[in-house]
Image: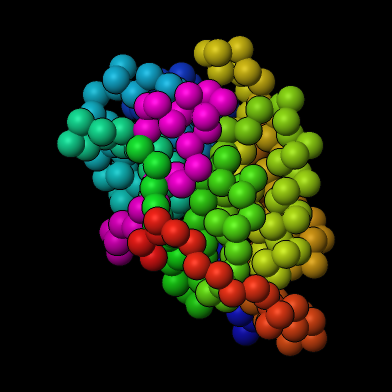
Amino acid sequence: MKNELKLALVQSPIIWEQPELNRDYFSSKIATLKNAVDVIVLPEMFTTGFTMSPENLDAKQGGITVAWMQEKAKELNAAIVGSIVYSERGLHFNRLFFVTPKAEVHHYDKRHTFTLAGENEKYQAGNKHLIVDYKGFKINLMICYDLRFPVWSRNTTDYDILVYVANWPKPRVEAWDTLLKARAIENMSYCIGVNRIGMDEKGLEYVGHSAIYDSLGQQLIFSEKEEVLSVNIDKDHLLEVRKKLKFLQDRDKFQLLGVKD
């Protein structure tokens, strides 16, 4: 039996600042999955769009969405990944959750808040990586703007998969494509990017380009339309490449300041 992980990437529009409607929408999207999968990946801020007005949202919505993720993970027997606006103690976070079918909840707060949009003024930046061991794969989880910072994603822990959930707009989508491929090659890992499509309330257009690249930079899947993409990734292939091309053995050693890993 192959050492594989079955993935579903949900590329979709997002209804502006309407968590309940978005939960219903994503429920309908993942209900269309015809085959069993191991991990379902949703975009960044999948219940609101990339809002810079977290004060407009009921703080209880974060917990409601996490409970929804737990319910769907159990129902589909698959881990669910995505980031949402999460508020606690009067502070706001762009927080990614990795929720397992056993209701285990792991989270990551976006390290690099997007200063161009003022995200740094509204949301607290994280200072800790999240690498989850799941079904034999080590998965490093990140959010959108983190993609531009290779030091933060550098593979110092021999992870197998690097995941970025995003709201990455059309004018800079070439950078998205290029950097996803670069992160895969330099880290000798699978690199997954899940982006949204459609227009948001600020007039920004999103064209998807959700994709998966293998450790040699080969594109395994790509889309520009609304759909749920399914693909299996092979750990044995990854290990064979790393055994043949021992580039990670020559990586630089360094320590990041201000990080609590």
Q: Is residue 69 left or right of residue 14?
A: left
Farthest left residue in view = 89
**Taking the image as drawn, is residue 225 in sight?**
no
Find out whether residue 134 is within the magenta segment: no
In front of the other: 96 or 25:
96
Q: Is residue 105 visible?
A: yes
**Who is closer to the viewer here, 244 or 222?**
244
Magenta segment boundaries in residue numbering: 102-123
Work out which quarter of the rendered image holds the N terminus and state it.
bottom right
User: Residue at horizontal 57%, vertical 33%?
Assistant: 167
Q: Residue furthest bottom?
A: 243
Q: Position of residue 103 (x, y in %)?
A: 28, 59
Position of residue 254 in the picture relative to residue 179 (left or right): left
What is the image's colouring?
A: rainbow
35 or 223, which lies in front? 223
- Residue 143 in the image: state x and y as whole percent: 52, 45
